[in-house]
Amino acid sequence: MLKLFIKDLRVGAIFLWAVVPLYVVTALQVSRFGAGFFWVNVTCASLLLVAVSMVDWKNEAEPFVHSLPVTRAMVVRGRYLTAIAVGLLSLAIGAAIGAARGTSLVMQGEPWPRWMAGDVGLAFAVVFAFIASVYLPCYFRWGFGKGNAAAALVLAAAGIAADIVGPALTGAGAPGSGLFYEGVPRGQVTQGVAHLAARYGMAPAGLIVVGLAAVLLWVSAQVAVRAYRRQEF
């Protein structure tokens, strides 16, 4: 499983050399507009995860991988390790860019941006974990093309239902609701994590969010393993 994870990292490295410079430039520009930077970071992390799958699909690597002494469960778990690595890398890049923008604002006499805070980082963790937990089972069940379409439909439906990609319509996170945190990216998840941190403190909120992300990925991995066993090559 570790070797499969390393293989994914090497594949991802091909894209990193091309994508990271462009991502840094884009993110620096978007960071001028505040909280929208959060969704740019989520999008880039998701695209990098999809890119690793795309390379395997384009090179028809799966038959070769399964000619090796590995089980399908090992292949799936290796890709979940890759997803975690992608999320951590994207979070680190986003934090570095956000810190640079925040430092620049402070030097100009402006306050530190609210969107560059620990609770927003926690929100990124749970949002990306959710995206990965939906995408990977779809990929392992239907392959790259149909799997991407299925995952996109599920994520779109979830975005509409949970309002994680736009202003909340009612309840927590709605402007004027009393639970809306100015400067935090809008949406039920981001605003909800900010409320959780404000109510219980950053450390308990961190434990809750990391635990939730771990549960999402663990359940998703079990589903993906079962789905992959039904996949034919």
Image (spheres, rainbow, N blue to C red):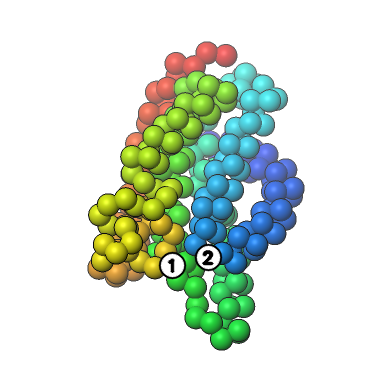
Circles 2 and 1, Cβ within 8 Å, touching? The answer is: yes
192 vs 183: above or below: above
The residue under label 2 is 34
Decide which of 153, 52 is in the foreground and name it: 153
175 vs 67: above or below: below
Please state if 43 lies on the left or on the right of 197 as rendered: right
Residue 194: numbered disc: none
Residue 138 in the image: state x and y as whole percent: 46, 27
What residue type is disc 2 on? Gly
- Which is more N-terminal, label 1 or label 2? 2
What residue type is disc 1 on? Gly
Residue 127 in the image: state x and y as whole percent: 42, 49
Decide which of 73, 24 is in the foreground and name it: 24
Residue furthest to the top: 232
Residue 197 in the image: state x and y as whole percent: 31, 66
Using the rendered view, name the quadrant where residue 7 is placed.
top right
Which SS class for mark 1? loop
Which SS class for mark 2? loop
Task: Tell me the quarter of the image containing the C terminus.
Answer: top right
Residue placed at 48% from the left, 32% from the top? 152
Categorize mark 1 by other alpha carbons within 10 Å: few (<14), some (14-19), many (20+): some
Residue placed at 50% from the left, 20% from the top? 142
The residue under label 1 is 183
Categorize mark 2 by other alpha carbons within 10 Å: few (<14), some (14-19), many (20+): some
114 vs 185: above or below: below
Residue 82 in the image: state x and y as whole percent: 55, 42
Residue placed at 56% from the left, 74% from the top? 102
Q: CA distance from mark 2 to mark 1?
A: 7 Å
